Image (tube, rainbow, N blue to C red):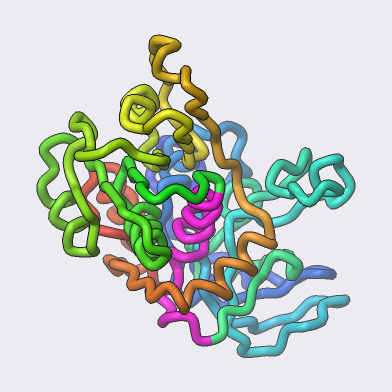
Amino acid sequence: MRAMMLESPGKPLVMRELPDPEPGRGEVRVRVLACGVCRTDLHVVDGELPEPKLPLIPGHEIVGTVDRIGEGVSGFTLGQRVGIPWLGATCGVCRYCRAGRENLCDKPLFTGYTRDGGYASHAIADARFVFPLGDIGDDIAAAPLLCAGLIGWRSLRIAGDGATLGIYGFGAAGHIVLQVAQAQGRKVFAFGRPGDKAAQDFARALGADWAGGSDEMPPEPLDMAIIYAPVGDLVPTALRAVRKGGRVVCAGIHMSDIPSFPYSLLWEERQLVSVANLTRADAVEFLNLAPGFGIKTTTTIYPLSRANEALDDLRSGHLEGAAVLVP
């Protein structure tokens, strides 16, 4: 099989020809049809997340078809269209797994980080963490739903039931969550990089009630805000924008240091929380609901061999929506 490999953090990926992998007990092999390029991939490739498996095949927004089934696996058929997300395996016995909070598992495995992912022609996955996709979108449109959509959904649920939502960082997750929130009848205010008119126009084109720079205040107080940009300076900014009792959710796996801020920004029962990973229940719930939200993902397609270019474009902020690799 062909794969783009990370051999040393901070270095470009390299194309390698590898033997076709064989699924072990409890695993399936998937022929990759599309793999989204997520900001978490950037954090892995750039060395901002510690101790990745090396060498590593990144990628965890995988859409493909099952082409080999390992021993002990039931519920899948050859040729079945499936998705593979970030959470690749959990221990099942720690206090978090037993409490239904497997996203906080003490001994997890993550696709494209601690086990090989989808920047390849084939991927091996634990069958328990593989999800049937049915006819959800086409392959390219569906790929961003496997992380930007799933983490977006979890962060939106944790943000609460408020009527006004602020989204800081309008990329892959932001453009999906905007559509979900609007389908739920909420008003959405989108914040991009200061001066980034293209991002603001993109948000408005998707139906944002207001769009501006992250250095601006929204036209009305927010009930809740979600921060997708990995920028710690946005935390006090978002706290200033939410009303009393409002909630700010930090949705990224990595963020620059949060600066000190006056207690008055947190007082009056404002809340600051984070989102970590996802659960299989999140995936089942969102993938069942997604068709009803009418989500239209905006994507830029790259052949697998141009994975480094896709990562560079994401790093520099030159993408609308999501990048997707096609083997």
Q: Is residue 15 above or below residue 70?
A: above
Q: Is residue 108 left or right of residue 322?
A: right
Q: Is residue 143 magenta?
A: yes
Q: Is residue 296 above or below residue 170?
A: below
Image coordinates of residue 283 in percent, x first then y, are 61, 64
- The percent position of residue 154, horizontal first and vertical second, equals 55, 52
Would residue 165 be found to the left or right of residue 62 on screen?
left
Verify whether residue 127 appears in magenta. no
Residue 45: x and y in percent read 45, 42
Count numbered badges in the picture.
0
Magenta highlight range: 135-157
Q: Is residue 74 left or right of residue 204?
A: right
| Quadrant (top left/top right/bottom left/bottom right) for the C terminus | bottom left
Quadrant location of the N terminus?
bottom right
Residue 316 is situated, as x and y percent measured from the top left of the image, at 24, 42
Q: Nearer the viewer, residue 82 or 287?
A: 287
Residue 297 versus residue 45: which sits nearer the camera? 297
Name the residue: 58% across, 61% down: 85
Q: Nearer the viewer, residue 288 or 88?
A: 288
Q: Residue at x 41, y 35 (%)?
A: 10
Could you tell me if residue 232 is visible in this image? no
Residue beneath the point at 32% across and 58% down: 175
- Magenta-drawn stretch, dominant element (helix, strand or loop): helix
Is 152 situated above or below 27?
above
Residue 63 or residue 281, whichever sits in front = 281
Residue located at (77% from left, 38% from top) = 106
Residue 28 in view of the camera: yes
